[in-house]
Amino acid sequence: MYKVKFMMGPSDCNDENIPKYSEDFIKELSEQLSEEVVYASMDEIAKEALPIYFIASGGAERDFSKNYKKTKGKYILLTTPAYNSLASALEILGFLHEQGLEGEIIHGSMQLIAKRLKVLKKVSEAKRKMVSMRLGCFGKPDGLLSSEVNEKDLKNTFGMEIVHLDLDELINEYNIGGYEENEYTKDLKTKDFNKDEIEKALNVYGALTRLIKKYSLAAISVKCFELLGKINTTGCLALAILNAQGIPAACEGDQKALVSMTIAYLITGNPGFMANPNYIDSDTKECVIAHCTLPLNMPDAYSLTTHFESGIGVAITSDIKSQPLTIFKSDGGEKYFAHVCSLEKTMHRNDLCRSQMTVKIDDYTFDYLMNNPISNHHIFVLGDWVEEFNELYK
């Protein structure tokens, strides 16, 4: 639902048809959004992640000037093509700029208005959720030189907090054993793979879910290579399930990947695939990416195999149809990269991490990866979400 504060000029200098015209406009906008748009009081608007001022006519400036201090952040001015709505919004925007405040006029075709409102609402809701999120890190990055975040920058930029946890606590919880059954655990057990290895991997999942609940974590990273010698299995399957359940989960203790996966999930509602760029053809701009922890709800079909580097545990190999992808990475502060690419095909090679894709990138992404990357791991999300990421950082 979208809540808007209806504002119009004094009735003695405005057309009596404005209220009816405005109601029809809102009804059409609701249909275009496939979501209801309703009038709300100023007190209700002040509580919204995205406060919207519906500037219905000329003269609405007076009402706006009396109420604008009740909301914070960017001022969204929704306008119509009639009754001097846009003219009033232009005056308001000029006023806001004089106060050093930010605003945006939403104007144009109904399709354009709806598209922009969807982006703004998604980003506003994501920003609200980020504040006070606790990201649990079981161990620090292992062998990664540029994958820790500046925790002060993370807190100042997004409001997120890193919670450092001992990997031994995860191992102790694993030794207790057990996990709750769900659609993913049940499906995994139907796969043609060693049942004992699946069970060991699911016990890692069970241990992580209990610790996530214990410490009120919204997302996690695991220094997973250290698990190999201690429990003789990997975290690949556990992280694949958690990502599918909407709990961003990064491997190798990579904090920047963890933050990036969390942001990506909040912005898109889809899990992100944390992957290594393995090879880029400078002529064709085809980039091979791969890793072992693909979210279980991302592929069209998947099967089980072993973890690539160790040859033990359980990892995911997959098939996904060709479609747009967004490549995204954050440094945990104000630096980020977001650009659209295209998934061309998935592969099943034996010399790479187990979920493998060839993606088509452009010169812009090629130059970024070769000359100014935010470390190695990047997050790939199904669909084109570049506008949403840009809006978040703007």
Image: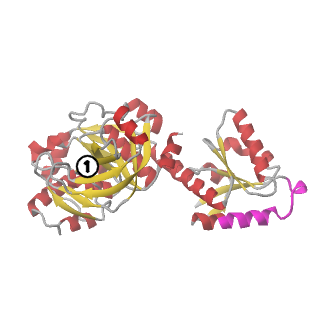
Image-based side of 41 in relation to 315, left or right = right
Magenta stretch: helix, strand or loop mostly: helix
Q: Give the quarter of the image for residue 33.
A: bottom right
Name the residue nearer the viewer: 147 or 386: 386
Please tell me whether residue 11 belongs to the stretch shown in magenta: yes
Residue 207, visible in the rendered structure: no
Label 1 amino acid? Answer: Ala
Say whether residue 130 is magenta.
no
Please, what secondary structure does the residue beneath circle 1 have?
Answer: strand
Span of residues in magenta: 10-28
Percent across and percent down for residue 258 are 33, 43
Q: Position of residue 127 (x, y in %)?
A: 49, 45
Q: Position of residue 86 (x, y in %)?
A: 76, 50
Q: Is residue 84 left or right of residue 118?
A: right
Look at mark 1 in the image and give the residue it sits on: 290
Q: Looking at this view, is 271 or 161 the one in front?
A: 271
- Work out whether 70 lies above or below 320: above
Dot 1 surroundings within 10 Å: few (below 14), some, or many (20 or more)?
many
Q: Is residue 138 above or below residue 113?
A: above
